[in-house]
Image (cartoon, helix red, strand yellow):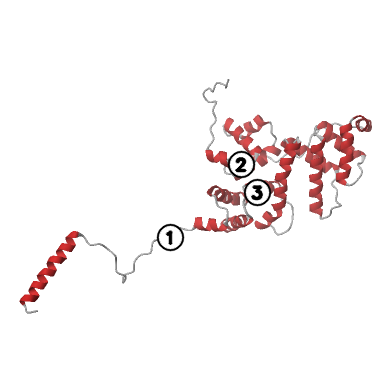
Amino acid sequence: MSALLLPNEILSMSAQAARLLVESGDGDGALLYLALLECGGEPARAASRLRWGEERLGPAWTRLSALGLVQPRENAPAPATAEDSRLPEYGRSEIAAALEKEPGFQGLCRELEGVLGRMLTDNDLRCLYTMYDYLALPPEVILQLAGWVAGRERRQKGTPAASPRMPQIQKEAFRWKRLGVDTLERAEDYLRREELVDQREWEILSAVGVTERRAAVGRERAYIAAWVDMGLSTELIRMAYERTVYKKGAMSWPYANKILQSWHAAGYKTPQQVEAGDRPPSRQPQPSKNQPRDFQPTRERIEKNGDWLDQFLAEQEKGGG
């Protein structure tokens, strides 16, 4: 039996909003939008309802803003950097017992050494056991995470021999936990999206005027991810950048985002479509003064001209031609 729908228990969403959310493929954005509908548009209530911290709320809000579904948050609090002041302190005896009695942890250690290309130290083992025991992340998720961090480290340093430190991997593990990336399926989905953003990050940074190669900072990365989700071409992003600089005198990520958001909503995919859409409608050419006008005379005018012609011919006959 379906639940009884009482007054004020029905939420409505526009078809356009539903289409944008579906096309973006952003699960966190869709959840946040539903929570905002339920909570009257209040970010704090929505975050509390979802049990999200700023680390997860901020990027989701930025992506919704890029889609034009919410207003930008101008004074959003900075993401928390401290992981947890109450972390357990695992001793050597606890780690040794886990290596002896927990087959899952034993296998994880062997696999991770292969991923990192080195033996794990005592401190590495403590960090790893924190992820395994305290965060309760499945071994396969930890391996996915470690492989991604290692790949990013090697790309940034330009050498396949680079190996991230275990505290770096642990810090990313806390972030994944806050984002809800705690199953193999969620990890694979998350990494697919991150890979797409990684592939285009420098390309898009270059398109918006960054000349020195570097990684995107947090807010930049969120905008880039939203633009990638919308399927925007680099040429279109470059055009938005040029218009932003012309209008603002410098690059403004929120302003460029508004331009791209409006183009995406209009269905523009190429600069040519934007130019055609921005061009004023062509005016019909006016006939020149020397060009004869094509018009149809009225019946009254035709009869009047006929009478005049008859009278003219009669007078010509009387006068002998």
Disc 2 versus disc 3: nearer the observer? 3
Q: Residue at x 59, y 44 (%)?
A: 67
Residue sitting farthest toward the left = 318
Up/down of 270 relative to 87, above or below = below
Q: Which type of secondary structure does the marked residue at label 2 adopt?
A: helix
Q: CA distance from mark 1 to mark 3?
A: 34 Å
The answer to the question of whether label 1 and label 3 lie on touching residues, with beta carbons closer than 8 A, is no
Q: Residue at x 67, y 54 (%)?
A: 204
* Mark sitting on residue 64: 2
* Mark sitting on residue 282: 1
**Mark 2 crowd level (few <14, some 14–19, many ≥20, 10 Å Cα):** many
Q: Which residue is mark 3?
A: 228
Residue 1 at x, y = what percent?
A: 58, 20
Which of the two labelled residues, at mark 2 and mark 3, occupies the earlier sequence position? 2
Residue type, mark 2 in image: Leu
Q: Nearer the viewer, residue 313 or 160?
A: 313
Up/down of 141 relative to 290, above or below = above
**Mark 3 crowd level (few <14, some 14–19, many ≥20, 10 Å Cα):** some
